[in-house]
Amino acid sequence: MAGIGAAPGNISRERPAPVGGVPVAVREDGAMVGVEAIIDKDVASSLLARQLSADMLLMLTDVDAVYLGYGTADARALRNVGATELSGKDFPAGSMGPKISAAIEFVQATGNPAAIGRLEDAAEIVERLQGTWFEP
């Protein structure tokens, strides 16, 4: 029984489970085999932190904070934001967008803070001296 998007070797790709899991393909004989997949590290980090009941989520990158207008003359670093304050703002998918979404998901699901900032500033971010903090 071939499924949607049959792949070579009579393997059908199935829609991934909405709660996550190991990506698999189901062969026509019903056997499942693992397949390669792209996993967003920010979403995965947020999910893992929630499942571990983490006190906070700290995402480290090469930028010191989240900026409104990043790369423009009007760029402004954000230091403390509410969990929904950045919802609907345009942040690039290949840059801060996934980090911001992951932070918002973590804060809304746990009521605990999340922060984004530069790797070198990790200790100062935890002390709330650097980075961008997302609060409930």
Image: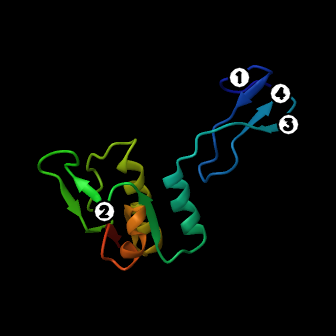
Ranked by sequence position, the earlier of labels 1 and 4 is 1
- 2 vs 4, front mark: 2
Q: Residues within 10 Å of mark 1 (few under 14, many from 20)?
A: some
Ranked by sequence position, the earlier of labels 2 and 4 is 4
Three-letter amino acid code at disc 3? Answer: Ala
| Quarter of the figure that contains the C terminus | bottom left
Q: Residue furthest left?
A: 74
Viewer can see residue 74: yes
Viewer can see residue 105: no
- Residue 51 appears at what percent x and percent y? 60, 68
Tell whether 97 sits left or right of 57: left
Three-letter amino acid code at disc 1? Answer: Ala
Q: Residues within 10 Å of mark 2 (few under 14, many from 20)?
A: some
> Which element carries disc 2, helix, strand or loop?
loop
Disc 1: which residue: 6
Residue 25, image quadrant: top right
Three-letter amino acid code at disc 4? Answer: Glu
Q: Residue at x 42, y 70 (%)?
A: 122
Tell whether 103 sits left or right of 23: left
- Residue 84 appears at what percent x and percent y? 30, 62
Residue 84 is marked as 2
Q: CA distance from mark 2 to mark 4?
A: 45 Å
The residue closer to the viewer here, 46 or 67, is 67
Disc 4: which residue: 28
Tell whether 75 sits left or right of 93: left
Q: Residue at x 38, y 54 (%)?
A: 62
Disc 3: which residue: 31
